[in-house]
Image (tube, rainbow, N blue to C red):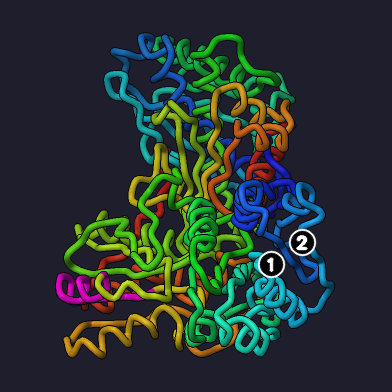
Amino acid sequence: MTVVERNNEYYSSVIFLNAALPLLKVIVAETKLAQSFATKSGKIQFAFTDEAGVKQGCHFSIEEGEWQVLSAVCPEPVDVELYFADRQHFNRFFKGQSKKLPQIKGWWQLGLLLPLFRALLKMQALLSAKVAPPDEATQLLLIKALFYLLSAGISQLNKAGHPVVRKWTQSSPDRVFAWSLTGHPDIAAYVRIKAGNSKAVRGSYERSQPFFTMRFADPESALGILLQTADLLQLTATQKLIMEGAPEFGAKIGDMMMLVGELAQP
Amino acid sequence: MGITYTSIETTKLSTAEVYGRRLTELAAQDERIVVLTADLAKSTKIGSFMEKFPERFYNVGIAEQNMIGIAAGMAKCGLIPFTSTFAVFNSCRALDQVHSDVCYQNINVKMIGSHAGTSFGQAGSTHHAIEDIAIMRSLPNLTVIVPADGTETANAVAAALEVQGPVYIRINRGFDQVVYPRPDYDFTLGKAIELRAGSELTLIACGSAVFQALQAASELKAAEGLQVRVLDMHTIKPLDKEAVLRALKETRRILTIEDHSIIGGLGGAVAEVIAESGCACAFKRLGLADCFSPIGYHEDLMSHHGIDSNGIVQAARELLQLEFEESEDWGDEL
């Protein structure tokens, strides 16, 4: 049996399966797409067959417009499946490097398929943004999506055994690293790490002050950093970016953010 | 997406820099204030004073003993010298001069020991000050202050100026988490500040441990509904004995937390008060357990020595004889 090599291709697929694709739920819930799914029920799956011949994937269970994300191949038949030939095809498609469509199983389920494609296009447009979107609603949605992508991405890489992330979490006591946007308490996320374990959570950590928080003063500065269009030092000096915690640990979480970004981009 | 930066550009966050700025403000109002450093002007963030008042700034070179001796002479002439060096050099290398030139003569020298505790963790044990509170509080006439953050450091510097006699202010390397977002709280020398009310346990902390104690109290409240009192014991000498005795009687359980040896520091001072009261109390001192520290980042060393919020929570559980179930749910929210 072929051993699946834990390389960047592997970790990119982990990010897309378990951190990026779950954002579909957020994007649908927070845009007009919610109406398209309002009365819909069914199961949608994204999958590919890995180097060892094992099917990998994630799926969404939708009940009357309510989405549930499940990080595994569905054990039962699904209504719609986007099936990619292999891991490379899967990664290249979501990195925007391949226009080759996946095999669509259940294509006749147009009631699910058409809004799903609209949601995928919306997600692609959002996550491939190079500059801040013009309207504030889209800016806020993008920030939220990126916070969720970063927290889940870091945690998923840890769970998948990425050596850099794993080394960091294994040596760490119980600590919470958070991202937040001033004035928008609903736009926040954190990752808790402890002795090799990790957990990504949406929202704010309420039990105490996180070990480290990257707090942005406004959407412009948040997107400036997250999209790498602004000068970090200038934003820090002008209090647009507030690091609550020791700078060494800000640098460390910055490294982890970079890692997720590199694996999710072409 | 991502972020890269170095700590060099974030010096504005440093507690030591707050001290430098506040002292510069005070010096504008009081011409008697002079500053001496032992070739550590940059590290101790006293550069702002040097730029504003170059004629009142003295760099004595790497000679801490001389610095204290010169400061004592200046004080004898009516000046108010503030000395700046690392806490370990102030309390150990220059101890003879602190003892004989300053404290014995009860003269008006203000000594600022920075990079205290394990806050300069990467520099190694030669630069860790883990005995300074014990040493300095045993010296007659000397007031000892351990501020919790930058704001409290500014208040401590102003309060030290009001004291007619020697004062030792122990501060960290910097980057302390904020305990006091505003300066206008009730800071009085010798009076502990109750940061959180509670009846089941009291955490008495100083310096960087205050923030950790607050976080631990929040965690204990969230996890078990415990009402934990938190005292910022910023003045180690004179100690607020009334606050200790009140905690003793009202909560019956006390944990002290300090970035210092458990021998002779805050824990020792509180233990003396408890022992002399004749009252029984569940009591534990958290700090460096009579050992030198390994090298590392301050936060990691605090964790290593059990004086971060996790360590305090664990010690509280043991003191209260409570069994807590660890959350084993490590599934990501998707």
Looking at the picture, which amino acid does disc 2 mark? Ala
Q: Is residue A136 magenta?
A: no
Which is more toward the observer, B69 or A131? B69
A53 over B143 or under it: above or below: above
Sort mark 2 into few (<14), some (14-19) or many (20+) by Cα contacts within 10 Å.
many
Q: Position of residue A100 (x, y in %)?
A: 69, 21
Q: Earlier in the sequence, mark 2 or mark 1?
A: 2
Q: CA distance from mark 2 to mark 1?
A: 8 Å
**Residue occupying the point 41% across, 50% down:** A209
Going by the image, does A144 lie left or right of B73? left
Q: Position of residue B62 (x, y in %)?
A: 82, 76
Count how many numbered circles sit on residues in the image: 2
Chain under callout 1: B
Chain under callout 2: B
* Element marked by disc 1: strand
**Residue occupying the point 34% across, 70% down:** B204
Looking at the picture, which amino acid does disc 1 mark? Ser
